[in-house]
Image (cartoon, rainbow, N blue to C red):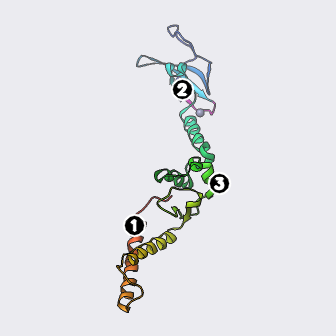
């Protein structure tokens, strides 16, 4: 508890004693420090602390530090219906990078279309050349993503003639080996990606 005096020296021109400033009530004179007049105030929550006269008069101090933090947290919570700190919200912010439909400029619309992020899943564009939208996005689990990426890689290899599914047993073995390698590589890259959306 900071020390204070109920008697205010006559040299103090603006007497704030017993005044209410926001959530703070001035309960005493706290002396002078570094040329500044200090007042001791009790916050509505009960916390008692010292405040600079200048900050009080300018309205910069209107509640204690604890109440300021609480208010800040409350503001964050209220943002976007309390979703601002959730993985669903982070997934939505991620859609800005690759472009998204106009409707999804609002988080609420995105949430209405896609629902909450299922645990462990990522938001994937079905067609990666097109922006995010309800018709071009889906929640995928890491396993599903992996399988899709492997399939895409194999399709690309087949298309490029790197492998030929229909031919010899030797080529089929090669195909299986490449699949295993592709899966392994993709698993590594997925594990290295600590950016759950
Ligand atoms: Zn307080």
Q: Identify the mark at residue 112; answer none if there is no mark.
A: 3
Residue position marked by numbered label 1 in the rendering: 189
The reply to whether residue 178 is in sight is yes
| Magenta-drawn segment | 44-49
Magenta stretch, overall SS: loop
Identified at 54% across, 11% down, the residue is: 14
Binning the other alpha carbons within 10 Å of mark 3 as few (below 14), some (14 to 19) or many (20 upward) gives few
Left or right: residue 169 versus residue 16 is left
Gap between marks 2 and 3 measured at Cα: 40 Å
Identified at 45% across, 58% down, the residue is: 195
Gap between marks 1 and 3 measured at Cα: 31 Å
User: Does the numbered disc 3 mark a residue whose Cβ is under 8 Å from ligand 1?
Assistant: no
Q: Identify the mark at residue 61; answer none if there is no mark.
A: 2
Q: Does 29 sit above or below residue 190?
A: above
Q: Quadrant of ligand 1?
A: top right
Label 3 element class: helix
**Mark 1 against mark 3, which lies toward the viewer?**
3
Binning the other alpha carbons within 10 Å of mark 1 as few (below 14), some (14 to 19) or many (20 upward) gives few
Q: Position of residue 62 (x, y in %)?
A: 57, 27
Gap between marks 2 and 1 measured at Cα: 49 Å
Q: Does 173 sit above or below residue 65?
A: below
Can residue 46 be found in the magenta stretch? yes
Label 2 element class: loop
Asked if the residue at tag 1 contacts the one at tag 2, i.e. Cβ–Cβ closer than 8 Å, the answer is: no
Identified at 36% across, 85% down, the residue is: 174
Residue toward you, 78 or 55? 78
Direction bottom: furthest residue: 169
Q: Position of residue 186 (x, y in %)?
A: 41, 70
């Amino acid at each position: 508890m900071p020390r204070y005096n109920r008697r205010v020296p006559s040299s103090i021109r603006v007497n704030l004693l017993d005044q209410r400033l926001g959530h703070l009530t001035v309960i005493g004179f706290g002396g002078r420090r570094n040329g500044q007049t200090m007042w001791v105030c009790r916050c509505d929550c009960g916390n008692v602390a010292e405040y600079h006269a200048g900050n009080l008069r300018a309205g910069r101090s209107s509640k204690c530090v604890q109440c300021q933090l609480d208010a800040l947290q409350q503001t964050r919570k209220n943002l976007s219906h309390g979703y601002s700190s959730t993985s669903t919200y982070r997934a939505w912010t991620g859609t800005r990078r690759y472009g998204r439909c106009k409707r999804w400029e609002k988080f609420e619309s995105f949430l209405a279309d896609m629902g909450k992020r299922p645990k462990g899943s990522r938001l994937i564009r079905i067609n990666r050349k097109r922006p995010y939208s309800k018709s071009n996005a889906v929640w995928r689990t890491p396993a599903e993503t992996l399988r899709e990426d492997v399939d895409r890689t194999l399709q690309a290899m087949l298309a490029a003639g790197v492998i030929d599914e229909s031919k010899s047993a030797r080529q089929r073995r090669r195909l299986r080996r490449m699949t295993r390698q592709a899966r392994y590589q993709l698993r590594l890259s997925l594990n290295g990606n600590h950016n759950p959306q």
